[in-house]
Amino acid sequence: MSDYVITPPVVAAVPIKGSSQMFPVRRIFCVGRNYAEHAIEMGSDPTREPPFYFAKPADALVVNEADMPYPPMTKQLHHEMELVVAIGSAGADIGVEDALKHVWGYCAGLDMTRRDLQNEAKKTGRPWDMGKGFDNSAPMGALVPARGIDVSKGKIELRVNGKVTQTSDLSKLIWSVPEVISNLSHLIRLAPGDLIMTGTPEGVAAVQKGDLLEGFVEGVGEVRTRIV
């Protein structure tokens, strides 16, 4: 048994729908600009250029419909509604045809973004970490096992205070879920506990303290949080 000089951090985890068990989270990878209309609204070319990734720390998770504190150092906290993929078995250089075999399950999630910090980082050629990987920046709903779930299509939507702000379909992903898993596995070895946020559709916008965010992915589940 290891003797640590400080208390080890609590394992970050996502609840599993209908179960008392939890899914331990190792890393969170996020795909940038994976819907054409969102790429356009962000001023980019919506072609099938190779996907690119950024990361969030595992302890950025907000689960069980807990509130999300409004983060410091920003005046532009934006929502980004996404399908999240939970990896259940390790693999590197995975073929597209085998990619879904490595998936444990799926959930609905929010990639919360300090847009002003991200935009400043883009201008100066600096990393996005403080715009994307800050505390409480990854609210997520409960995971559902992958068996029987078709993520090649299905409605994805977010409501803020009951008003639809983002709505699209998983069929509009520029890079499909199997393609994303395969591509990422050629860059790093995927491991059990890794989460992949697959990109957001158009309609990203700023939220304020008091706003209630309610999103869902058809056939997968919901995510809910209030900004406080």
Image (spheres, rainbow, N blue to C red):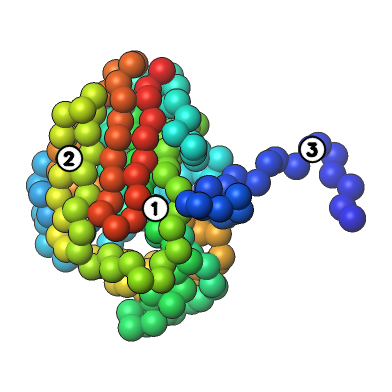
- Residue furthest to the front in view is 18
Q: Which mark is residue 166?
A: 2
Q: Amino acid at mark 1?
A: Cys
Residue shown at 39% from the left, 82% from the top: 98
| Residue that badge 1 annotates | 107
The answer to whether 191 appears left or right of 182 in the picture is right
Q: What is the distance, in whole Å, between disc 1 and disc 3 at their CAs?
A: 30 Å
Q: Residue at x 33, y 83 (%)?
A: 97
Residue 120 appearing in the image: no
Q: Are marks 1 and 3 in contact (CB under 8 Å)?
A: no
The quadrant of the picture occupied by the N terminus is: bottom right
Residue 111 figure quarter: top left
Of the pair 33 and 226, the residue shown nearer to us: 226
How far across and down, in percent of the image, does residue 210 sit?
33, 16
Q: Which residue is mark 3?
A: 7
Residue 27, disc: none
Left or right, 17 with reference to 207: right
Location of the C terminus by quadrant is top left
